[in-house]
Image (cartoon, grey):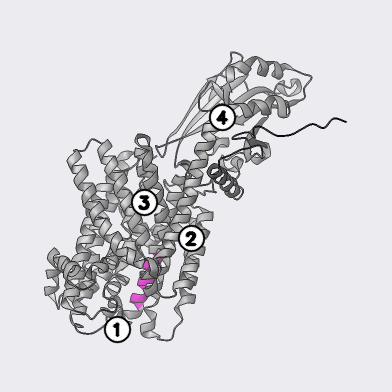
Amino acid sequence: MEPKHNFDKISAAGILIAFGIIYGDIGTSPLYVMQAIIGKEVISDEIIYGALSCIVWTLTLQTTVKYVILILRADNRGEGGIFALYALVRKHARWLTVPAIIGGSTLLADGIITPPISVSSAVEGLRILYPNIQTIPIVIAILTGIFLIQAFGTKIVGRAFGPIMITWFSMLGVLGLYQVMDHPEIFKALNPMYGYELLTKHPGGFWMLGAVFLCTTGAEALYTDLGHCGRANIRVSWVFVKICLVLNYFGQGAWLLSEVGNMLNERKPFYEVMPDWWLLPGIVIATSAAIIASQALISGSFTLISEAIRLNFWPKVRLVYPSDQKGQLYVPSVNWLLWLGCMVVVFYFKESSNMEAAYGLAITMTMIMTTILFSYYLYLKRVNLWIVIVFMLLYLSIEGLFLGANLLKFTHGGWFTILVGVLVAGLMSVWLRAFYIKLRLTEYTKLESYLPALKELSRDISIPKYTTHLVFMTNASRVSEIETKVIYSIFQKRPKRADIYWFIHVDTTDDPYTMEYKVNTIDDDETVIKVNFKLGFRVEQRINLFFRKVVEDMVMNKEVDITSRYESLSRQNVTGDFRFVVLERFLSFENDLPFIEQMVMKTYFFVKDFTTPEDKWFGLDSSSVKIEKVPLIIRPVENVKLRRVYV
């Protein structure tokens, strides 16, 4: 893990990566926000000043104050995101699982619509130059390319995209400044009264909040990608980003002042503020920024899934670490599921204006859940209770208003992201419920009561030796206990004679980068040894490598002799062979389950068949691993009505 002072240290490289990774979504909002607010309304001073006022105060209260100033404080040893926040508070209240699952699932659902709307909005600018151009094939090609490059990691992507995003924000600022110089009166919109009057007095003004919210949808990405960039780098770079965003929004408002009384029709205010000679380069830069907007949500989704797996919210899918830099990972299954979802969005909605009608509803739910979790975090940190209450009520009120306005989008396509969110939340709930069912009903026994039998088995030359070192992966966290299934495997399934029996247990901690282990030699002659690993929820579980390191340390300290016990090999100091046994459970037919639990476990095992096997998840060498299927008998069938017929 990086030292704490590095996390709060400002660096040019860190700022560059921050620009390249986290500002894509919020940075491309000017492409469509003003167009979405005005829609089919006649352009008026009331709408222009009111919309700009709502935007600037939304960016200030929601993004700057809530996320950049406050929530970035809630880091879990440098890691951010709703699951990292949940890991900080979950021990204190079990009900916090509910907002964590809702927030995580809706954030993943939002990741399906962000790439298509950003890329489509940018590419559709080509219609100004080429009215008959077909944009859908271009959008599909760009999105496919984005998902193909994910395997290279966000370190490479961030450094490549950083300069592009700096160019993008500079362009936003310059174009906006160019327009406001002709209409300096536009800065009157800084007065929040204009926003209040638009929402309360303009017919249908309240529902415009749904479009206003689009200006801050990327705020959650600032927190999710905290581990990639560092808190100090995000805060410093945000100052520049916000100035450029506000200037561009006000520049679009200044142009709209010259169009009072007209309707937008198909025109995009973002492109209208550009000089004609800059249009093509502007479209190219906008498309590049839209690609980065997609990257922000995709990398955030990877972070989210990796944390969900370790918190027992998600199946154990394959994780790839493209580089040795902290926080870098790639999740192939999630990558291609997101790609498939994006393709569905593009073909179903076709136009960015249709996507705007569906965008924002899911991410509003994420922000509400983050507010609840952070309020509880402040309470645990013994912040003054009145401050906690004011924070919670203020932001639940603001986000509640946004949610209310966004509910109008449900029938216009918002149902799609909510449906995806419900499916994801359902899978998370099933996985967590199945984990607790297994945990509750797994049978354990005292290890010491089997020590004499294990020693006797080890010395019994009438049984062929199975291996020199037999290593079992076990769920028993207590040193004194072992699962009855492990004992059954050693003595009954096929007697497994070995010289040394190792039992390995892995605990996943709420601290993301913990890497510790304890060794307990259960008997005096080193026949039975138990190793307990404590690994953080962001640590790759390379048990093969970690166990080898443990054995090396024990040999160096003369705690164990791993020389082969075969006489011919022992004389040559050959190391004994190691063999891992992983018990893989399946749902036994010998169960009498309540209907709900039956459906939970059937769903769990059905999905599990498509996920990474236990041996590969633990990073074990497949050539030395034995997978044993063991039945999970949750509740045996009682009162079997079977009658013997005598001959």
Question: Which residue is located at x 23 percent, y 56 percent?
Answer: 398
Amino acid at dot 2 = Leu
| Residue that numbered label 1 is attached to | 276
Please report the bounds of the magenta region as a residue range.
281-292
Question: Which residue is located at x 23 percent, y 75 percent?
Answer: 252
Q: Is residue 181 above or below residue 85?
A: below
Q: Nearer the viewer, residue 53 or 590?
A: 590
Distance from the alpha carbon under mark 4 to that under mark 3? 32 Å
| Residue that numbered label 4 is attached to | 504
Amino acid at dot 1 = Asp
Q: Quadrant of residue 282?
A: bottom left
Q: Are marks 4 and 3 in contact (CB under 8 Å)?
A: no
First in sequence, mark 3 or 1: give its number.
3
Q: Which element type, helix, strand or loop, lies under badge 1?
A: helix
Give coordinates of residue 410: x percent, y percent.
38, 65
Amino acid at dot 4 = Ile
| Residue that numbered label 3 is attached to | 224
